[in-house]
Image: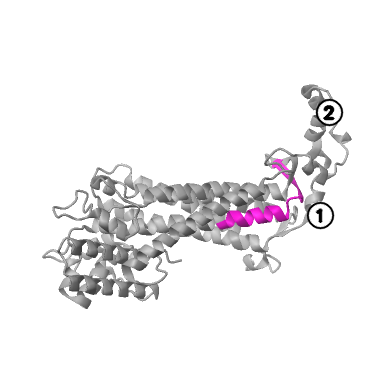
Amino acid sequence: MGKLWQKDYTLDSLMEDFTVSNDYILDQQLVIADALASIAHARGLHLIGLLSDEELSSLEQGLSQVIKLRTDDSFPITKENEDCHTAIEAYLTDLVGEAGKKIHTGRSRNDQVQTALRLWMREYAVKLCNLTGQLAERLVDFAEEHASVPMPGRTHMQLAMPSSVGLWAASFAEELYDEAQHLMQLSWTLDQSPLGSAASYGVPIPLDRQFTAEQMGFTRVQNNVLYANNSRGKFEAMLLDSCDYIALTLSKLAQDLILFTLPEFGYFSLPKQLCTGSSIMPQKKNPDGLELARSRSALVSSASMRVKSIIRSLPSGYNRDFQDTKEPLLCGTKATWQLVHIFLRMLDGLEVHPEALEKACTSELYATDVVLKQVLEGKNFRDTYKEVGLHLDALAKFDPHKALEERTSLGTTGNLGLDEDKFFISLMRNGCEDILKSFSEAYHNLCGIEDVQTVLY
């Protein structure tokens, strides 16, 4: 089978290289989503009498085979195919004949790609929300386990005020929870079907867009067909922005761990199986994973900006520029997925060294505590601040554990509020599981295969 747009000439080979690029390789990610959307589309065509019962049955069986082949990593897409969409239609035509040639009736490759991407993105958003929630949960557990371990708090990288390992870990847990919640909210935006919008302007046949949306488990149709097209790239950028927030947080966590595992600090030790060696220095165990976490964070940020730069000045309607948003989407989302997994493993093997942490809590760390104790005794803050600042050498050694306990305001070292953190994270993760279950049920109803997933990592 030729290209979906095949004419009475052969495309120049350089132009083919230029227009196809590596799309046919990237599209392995979208095979299952496209097959599911194609089943829904076929059912829509059957509903309005454009496919017979027999044709629908043969197409559903063929598309289910495509899903099984892709699950086994056995569905080839060639450069000549251009993308998975042509490859799937060619496979169907070879398998079931004329019915395969009817599957594209009423849709453009534009809304076909859009729908496959939308299925993939909404599942990814919920899965990443759930995975990020898992990491937040693990950080809360870590915070609870080490809640009373003193740790110097720093500002401007200098010693500042008493803190704890619990406060440090819980700060990242709550930050990741908020970012996961952002993904959950975005999943609602992504959960609308563009199928039936065609090349931006619909088609003059009575497609039931609500029916096909329900078949795929979408909560609603993306109503305006031109907006359905114009949202391409924009929704990808939204998802990448959400990934970027998570990556930024993990970059900061990576930097903290690199710093605090230095021998000069010795607060923590990384699991050795996650450290690499040097080609020349036999003693080295390098935190390469954490260093790459910082750079991968930049990769995610650049992916988001790349998509927005591509779509920034496009006119309404379909433009081929959209094709180039796919690579940054798939690369940025994969990098974020790997980042979260790496930190789950880091935390599982991270060792805390209480003696080193307590030793680092020197007298100057309690200067502000001394000022505030005198204020509570009736002195004014400004004069006491000056007096203590001029006589830092007179500061006595404080009990670091008592200093933590004396901070009783919500969210401080003596009152971390971890139970509330656990409750809200658990609630969010349960919500993710329910949504993913609804997707799985819709996919099973489409193809009859158990545990179908569009996101294969």
In this rendering, position of residue 10 left or right of residue 454: left
Q: Residue at x 21, y 70 (%)?
A: 56
Vertical placement of residue 196 versus 98, above or below: above
Q: Which of the 4 image quarters holds residue 398? A: top right
Q: What residue did someone put label 1 on?
A: 355
Vertical placement of residue 56 versus 301, above or below: below
Looking at the image, is mark 2 or mark 1 earlier in the sequence?
A: 1
Q: Secondary structure at mark 1?
A: helix
Where is residue 397? Give x, y as percent.
Answer: 87, 41
How many labels were placed on the picture? Answer: 2
Where is residue 112? Give x, y as percent.
Answer: 26, 59
Q: Observer-nearest residue: 411 or 17? A: 411
Where is residue 159? Give x, y as percent.
Answer: 74, 41
| Label 2 – label 1 distance at C-alpha | 30 Å
Residue 135 within the magenta-colored segment of the rendering: yes
Mark 2, Cα crowd under 10 Å, few <14 / some 14-19 / many 20+, is: some
Residue 454 within the magenta-colored segment of the rendering: no
Where is residue 162? Give x, y as percent.
Answer: 76, 42
Q: Is residue 412 visible?
A: yes
Front: mark 2 or 1? 2
Residue type for callout 1 = Glu
Q: Residue at x 28, y 69 (%)?
A: 79
Find the magenta span and give its range: 134-154
Residue type for callout 2 = Gln
Mark 1, Cα crowd under 10 Å, few <14 / some 14-19 / many 20+, is: few
Farthest left residue in view: 8
Q: Residue at x 52, y 56 (%)?
A: 430
Q: What residue did someone put label 2 on?
A: 374
